[in-house]
C-alpha cells in the first residue's frame, strides 16, 4: 500500500502540481516568473556558487533525461566499458561541482546580510530540498556504482510505466532505501516547481539564438 | 526609405545649473519604491567626474554597447555573443554591483525622540535600506562628486581623461581655473539599443509608435543582461522584485501630450523634446560608420520632415498627419539636424542615442590673473579673440570630443564657432560694441547667417513651453492604457496608493516565490 502511495500516487500528484500549477502561475501571475537574481547585491560568492552548481546540475539532469528518453541508445553507448567508466567519472565530477556550488550558495545566503534580506522561506525550502537531493544522488553514485547502467533497468522502466499509465512498482520496490529516497525527493523537487523560483528553468531563453537583436512592438497593427 | 517616428530630446548644457530638480521630480514619481531606491532614471553628473554608476563610461569594465567587428564588418555586442549570453546566464561576469552604485540608506530618526536622557545629544544613525542594519560609514552616494567634491578621487578618474595629455589635465585642474559642467542623463531611447539586443528573454522592446524603449516586466526573467548591454547604464535591476526597470520617458504623460516630469520641472529650461522622422533603413549603416563619421551618419538617419518624399513615405508607413506636423515643429530637429548644434553622448557606443546635447561653452574666456578676473586675450581687440580663444578654452576640445563626437574635434569646433557667432551677433545687436566686420567674420567662420543665429538665440534663450515641448497627444487607439481593463469606480479596481501597481497589469508587483 505504502508503495502505491509513494511510487504511484505521489509521482502523479507531483507532476500534476508541476504542470497545472505552472500553467496557472504563468497565466495569473506571470510577473513572478523570475530567476530572482541576487547578483546585484553580491557578486563574488555567487560566481563560486552559481556557476559550478548550474553547470553541474543541468548536465547531470540532462543525462538523467536522455537515458530516460532514449534508453536504447544509452544502453548501446555504455555497453563499452571505457565509455561507462568515462561517464561515471564525468558524472561524479559534475555532481561534485554541483554539491560544492550548492554549499557555497547556502553559505552565501547564510552569511551575507544583503542576501539574507531578500531570502524567503521558499528560497530556504528549495535550497534544503536540493541539498538533500544532491547529497543522496552523490551517495548513490558512490555506494552503488555503475548507476548509468542499472538506472536503465530500474528507474527507467518504472518511469515509463508511469508515463503509459500502467504503474509497475516492482522495478523499484527492492532498491536500497537511499535510492528510493533520491527518487521520491526528486518528485518533491518537481512538485516544488510552480511554488518556487525553480519556475525559471522552463523560461530558459533558447529562442534568443534565432531572434533578431532588436525588438519593435506596436500596440495595434498600424 | 522606411520612415518611423521617434521621440527625441535635446539638453542644452550651457543652461544647466545643476540643481537636480529633474532628479527629484523623477525620483518622487517613479523610483521611491523598495528595490528601486538606488535607481536614478534621471541623474545629473558633474563633469569631469566618474558619474553614476562609478566610471560607467569605462566599457572595459562594463562591456556596454556595440563594437564593429573589424573582420566581419558586423556589429556585435561588446558584452558577448548570443551563445555567450546563454553560457554566462548563471552569472553575468560584467554586471555592476550595488557597490558600483551605492547602498541606499535612511536615518534612524526615531532615536531622536526615543533616546534615553543623557549627557550627549542623540543621533540619527544611518540605516541601510537593503539590510535594515546600521551603517557605520557611508562611503558613497548617488552624487558623491557633485560640484567636483573629492576631485582627486573622482574628477581625476574620469574615463574621458584617459587619453588627455599632461597639459590638458593640468589645464582642467589648475585651481584658479577649475572648471566643470553638469551632464544630466536619462535613458537615450536609442535607435539601436544595446539593452534590447542583450535581453535573451526579449522582454525589452522599442515601442513602434514613438520609439520609447520599455521593459515588459511580465516577460523579464531576471537574466540581468540588459544592465550590461546598455553602455549608459540606464537599465537598472530592482533587487526586490527581481525585474529590470528603466526610464519610461513618463509615457503616460507623453500620451496625453505632456512632457516628461524631468522636462517639465527643469529649472534651467535646458530640455527640449520633439519628434524626429527617422529612416529605419539607414540605422544599421549609421551604427557601423567609422568613429569620426558617427555623428554625421547619425544626422543622416534623421529625415527632412518638409521633404515631400519623406512625408509620402511617412504616410505610407502609417504615421498620422498630426505627427508629421509635430515633426516639422520639432525643436530637436532644429538643434540636431538644421543647426547641427546638438550632439549625441558617446556616439562610439553605437546605440544611436536619441538624446542630444548642446556642448557647454563654459566660461571660455575668463580666468584669474594676478587675482583679477580677466578675459583671455581680450582687451583692446574687441571680442575677436573669442574666436581664437576656443583652443584655449578651459575645457579642452579633446575632452568634449571624447564625450560628444567619438574623438572628432572638428565637429566640436564647428559647434563652438556657431555658438560664438550667436553671442557675437547678439552682442553687436544689443550692446552695440562689436564692429560689423567682426560680426561678419564670426558668422562666416561658423558658416551661418544672421537669420539662423537669431533663430538659435530665440530657441535657446526665450522659448515658450510650447516651443520647447512639442509632443502630440497619442491617438487613442494606440495609447497603451487602451489595452488595460477599464477602471471601474464600483469595484474600485484602481490603485489606491502609489507603487501599488505597475503598468500593464493590475497586480501588485511583488517579489516572486
Ligand atoms: C538551464 C536552465 C537554468 C538557467 C538558465 C538558470 C538560471 C539561473 C539564474 C540566472 C539564477 C540567478 C542567479 C543570480 O542570483 O544571479 C539561478 C538561480 C538558481 N537556480 Fe537556476 N538555472 C537553470 C537551471 C536550474 C536547475 C536545473 C536548478 C535546480 C534543479 C536550478 C536551481 C537554482 C537555484 C536553487 C537558484 C538560487 C541560487 C541562490 O541564489 O541561492 N537552476 N538560476
Ligand atoms: S540608453 Fe536607454 S535605450 Fe539606450 S541602451 Fe541604454 S537603456 Fe537602452
Ligand atoms: S532641472 Fe534642469 S537645470 Fe536643474 S539639474 Fe536638471 S537639467 Fe539641470
Image (cartoon, coloured by chain):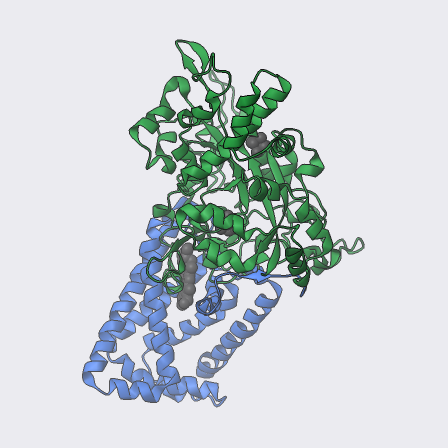
- Above or below, comparing residue A140 to residue B376 in the picture: below
Check the image and name the residue furthest to the front: B437
Residue at image position (18%, 82%) is A82
Camera-nearest residue between B279 and A58: B279
Residue at image position (51%, 42%) is B39
- Above or below, comparing residue B157 to residue A118 in the picture: above
Q: Position of residue A219 (x, y in %)?
A: 66, 61
> Is residue B449 at least partly visible in the picture?
yes
Determine the colour of chain A.
Answer: blue
Q: Taking the image as four quarters, which one is ligand 3 found in?
A: top right
Check the image and name the residue furthest to the right: B490
Determine the colour of chain B.
Answer: green
Q: Which quarter of the image is occupied by the N terminus of chain B?
A: bottom right
Q: How many marks?
A: 0
Camera-nearest residue between B68 and B151: B68
Q: Position of residue B414 (x, y in %)?
A: 48, 35
Camera-nearest residue between B423 and B93: B423
Quarter of the image where one finds residue B9: top right
In the picture, measured across the screen, residue A28 lies left or right of residue B165, that is right
> Is residue B19 at least partly visible in the picture?
no
Q: Position of residue B185 (x, y in %)?
A: 52, 39
Residue at image position (27%, 73%) is A91
Camera-nearest residue between B185 and A93: B185
- Above or below, comparing residue B435 to residue B338 in the picture: above
Q: Position of residue B90 (x, y in %)?
A: 38, 60
Amino acid at each position: 500500500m505504502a508503495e502505491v502511495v509513494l511510487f504511484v500516487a505521489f509521482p502523479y500528484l507531483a507532476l500534476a502540481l508541476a504542470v497545472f500549477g505552472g500553467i496557472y502561475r504563468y497565466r495569473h501571475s506571470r510577473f513572478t516568473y523570475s530567476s530572482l537574481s541576487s547578483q546585484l547585491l553580491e557578486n563574488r560568492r555567487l560566481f563560486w556558487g552559481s556557476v559550478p552548481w548550474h553547470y553541474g546540475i543541468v548536465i547531470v539532469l540532462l543525462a538523467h533525461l536522455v537515458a530516460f528518453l532514449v534508453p536504447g541508445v544509452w544502453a548501446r553507448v555504455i555497453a563499452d566499458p571505457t565509455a561507462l567508466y568515462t561517464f561515471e567519472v564525468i558524472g561524479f565530477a559534475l555532481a561534485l561541482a554541483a554539491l560544492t556550488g550548492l554549499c557555497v550558495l547556502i553559505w552565501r545566503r547564510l552569511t551575507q546580510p544583503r542576501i539574507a534580506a531578500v531570502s524567503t522561506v521558499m528560497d530556504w525550502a528549495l535550497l534544503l530540498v536540493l541539498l538533500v537531493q544532491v547529497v543522496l544522488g552523490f551517495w548513490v553514485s558512490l555506494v552503488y556504482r555503475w548507476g548509468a547502467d542499472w538506472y536503465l533497468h530500474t528507474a527507467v522502466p518504472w518511469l515509463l510505466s508511469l508515463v503509459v499509465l500502467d504503474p509497475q512498482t516492482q522495478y523499484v520496490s527492492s532498491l536500497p532505501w537511499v535510492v528510493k529516497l533520491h527518487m521520491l525527493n526528486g518528485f518533491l523537487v518537481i512538485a516544488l516547481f510552480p511554488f518556487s523560483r525553480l519556475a525559471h528553468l522552463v523560461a530558459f531563453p533558447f529562442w534568443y539564438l534565432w531572434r533578431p537583436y532588436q525588438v519593435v512592438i506596436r500596440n495595434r497593427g498600424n | 526609405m522606411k520612415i518611423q517616428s521617434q521621440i527625441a530630446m535635446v539638453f542644452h548644457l550651457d543652461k544647466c545649473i545643476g540643481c537636480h530638480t529633474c532628479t527629484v521630480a523623477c525620483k518622487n514619481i517613479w523610483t521611491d519604491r523598495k528595490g528601486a531606491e538606488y535607481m536614478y532614471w534621471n541623474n545629473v553628473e558633474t563633469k569631469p567626474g566618474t558619474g553614476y554608476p562609478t566610471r560607467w563610461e569605462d566599457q572595459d569594465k562594463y562591456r556596454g554597447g556595440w563594437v564593429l567587428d573589424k573582420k566581419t564588418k558586423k556589429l556585435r555586442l561588446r558584452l558577448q555573443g548570443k551563445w555567450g549570453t546563454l553560457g554566462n546566464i548563471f552569472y553575468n561576469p560584467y554586471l555592476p554591483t550595488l557597490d558600483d552604485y551605492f547602498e541606499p540608506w535612511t536615518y534612524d530618526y526615531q532615536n531622536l525622540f526615543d533616546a534615553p536622557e543623557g549627557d550627549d545629544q542623540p543621533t540619527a544613525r544611518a540605516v541601510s535600506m537593503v539590510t535594515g542594519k546600521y551603517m557605520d560609514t557611508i562611503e558613497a552616494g548617488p552624487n558623491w562628486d557633485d560640484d567636483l567634491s573629492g576631485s582627486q578621487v573622482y574628477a581625476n578618474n574620469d574615463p574621458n581623461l584617459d587619453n588627455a595629455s599632461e597639459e590638458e589635465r593640468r589645464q582642467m585642474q589648475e585651481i584658479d581655473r577649475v572648471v566643470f559642467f553638469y551632464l544630466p542623463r536619462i535613458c537615450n531611447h536609442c535607435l539601436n539599443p544595446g539593452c534590447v539586443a542583450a535581453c535573451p528573454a526579449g522582454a525589452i522592446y522599442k515601442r513602434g509608435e514613438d520609439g520609447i524603449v520599455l521593459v515588459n516586466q511580465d516577460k523579464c526573467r531576471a537574466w540581468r543582461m540588459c544592465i550590461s548591454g546598455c553602455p549608459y547604464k540606464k537599465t537598472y535591476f530592482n533587487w526586490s522584485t527581481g525585474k529590470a526597470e528603466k526610464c519610461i520617458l513618463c509615457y503616460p504623460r507623453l500620451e496625453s501630450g505632456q512632457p516628461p516630469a524631468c522636462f517639465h520641472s527643469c529649472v534651467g529650461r535646458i530640455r527640449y523634446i520633439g519628434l524626429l522622422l527617422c529612416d529605419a533603413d539607414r540605422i544599421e549603416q549609421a551604427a557601423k560608420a567609422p568613429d569620426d563619421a558617427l555623428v554625421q551618419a547619425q544626422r543622416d538617419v534623421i529625415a527632412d520632415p518638409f521633404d515631400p518624399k519623406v512625408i509620402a513615405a511617412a504616410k505610407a508607413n502609417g504615421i498620422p498627419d498630426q505627427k508629421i506636423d509635430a515633426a516639422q515643429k520639432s525643436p530637436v530637429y532644429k538643434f540636431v539636424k538644421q543647426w547641427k548644434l546638438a550632439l549625441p553622448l558617446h556616439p562610439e557606443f553605437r546605440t544611436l542615442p536619441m538624446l542630444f546635447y548642446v556642448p557647454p561653452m563654459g566660461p571660455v574666456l575668463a580666468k584669474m590673473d594676478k587675482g583679477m578676473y580677466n578675459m583671455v586675450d581680450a582687451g583692446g581687440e574687441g571680442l575677436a579673440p573669442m574666436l581664437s580663444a576656443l583652443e584655449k578654452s578651459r575645457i579642452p576640445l579633446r575632452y568634449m570630443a571624447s564625450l560628444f563626437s567619438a574623438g572628432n574635434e572638428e565637429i566640436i569646433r564647428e559647434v563652438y564657432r556657431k555658438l560664438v557667432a550667436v553671442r557675437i551677433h547678439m552682442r553687436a545687436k544689443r550692446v552695440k560694441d562689436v564692429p560689423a566686420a567682426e560680426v561678419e567674420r564670426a558668422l562666416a567662420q561658423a558658416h551661418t547667417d544672421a537669420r539662423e543665429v537669431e533663430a538659435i538665440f530665440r530657441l535657446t534663450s526665450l522659448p515658450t513651453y510650447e516651443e520647447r515641448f512639442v509632443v502630440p497627444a497619442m491617438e487613442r487607439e494606440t495609447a497603451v492604457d487602451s489595452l488595460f481593463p477599464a477602471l471601474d469606480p464600483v469595484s474600485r479596481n484602481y490603485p489606491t496608493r502609489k507603487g501599488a501597481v505597475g503598468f500593464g497589469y493590475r497586480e501588485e508587483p511583488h517579489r516572486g516565490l
